[in-house]
Amino acid sequence: MKKNKLMDFVGLNEMTKQIVLLAGNIELMSMNALLTNKDSNGRSGFSAVSEELRGFSLDVKEGAKQLSFQFSLIISQVACESKLNRRARIFHDTQIKSPLTENYVITAQNKIHDFLESSYCNFIDELNKALRLLQKIEHYCIVGNGLSMAGKIEATYLNKLSEMLYDISRNVGNVILEIFTIIKEMKERIGRYLI
């Protein structure tokens, strides 16, 4: 179970890195839309939407980086917990029935048990922090999804570039949906440890 727990959080951290990459893609698409719109001497609502999408992508990237740091803390904690559990099993398996050794082993086991108990409370706190960060990123994505829809609407009012800008907005929307899917899976996986 411990190794699976460790691997689960390593996987969650990798998913967070995927969110950072997707947010970077949105940033590039929004910058491309801005440049395209400027090249056509366009001053439209689409420029404003593109700027907002760029800001959104930066917010998502920053939130995901914070989340990755949080998962790194959790991974360290789970690894330490696993190491202490191994030590506790070794102490238990190698108990020698001499009065001095037995007292030492019992004291060590009690210290390990106490530490693991407080560690579990810290683990739950760290998971709750991770969930709050996920919710923050999810909120950014809700805003970004609205911006993507606004971009599609603005693109329909432009003549020359409307099809290309509409495609950019649609692609941004698809990337945001992909981020939503990742967030949903991450929340489910974290939720298993909070029951």
Image: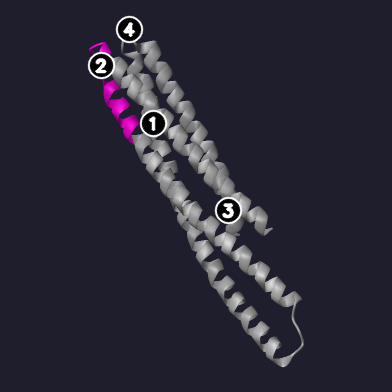
In this view of the protein, can residue 188 be seen by the observer?
A: no
Kind of element beneath mark 3? helix
Which circle, 1 or 4, is nearer the viewer?
Answer: 4
- Could you tell which of marks 4 and 2 lies nearer the N-terminus? 2
Kind of element beneath mark 1? helix
Q: Amino acid at mark 2?
A: Lys
Q: Label 4, on which residue?
A: 160
Kind of element beneath mark 4? loop
Residue 88 lies in the magenta stretch: no
**Which of the numbered marks, if any, corresponds to residue 191?**
3
CA–CA distance in space, label 3 to label 2:
46 Å
- Could you tell which of marks 3 and 1 lies nearer the N-terminus? 1
Label 1, residues with CA under 10 Å away: few <14, some 14-19, many ≥20:
some
Q: Amino acid at mark 1?
A: Gly
Label 2, residues with CA under 10 Å away: few <14, some 14-19, many ≥20:
few
Residue 54 lies in the magenta stretch: yes
**Which residue is rendered at x = 61% and y = 76% of the image?**
113
Contact, CB < 8 Å: mark 4 with mark 2? no
**Which stretch did the figure color magenta?**
38-55
Q: Position of residue 172 (x, y in %)?
A: 43, 26
Q: Quadrant of residue 25?
A: top left
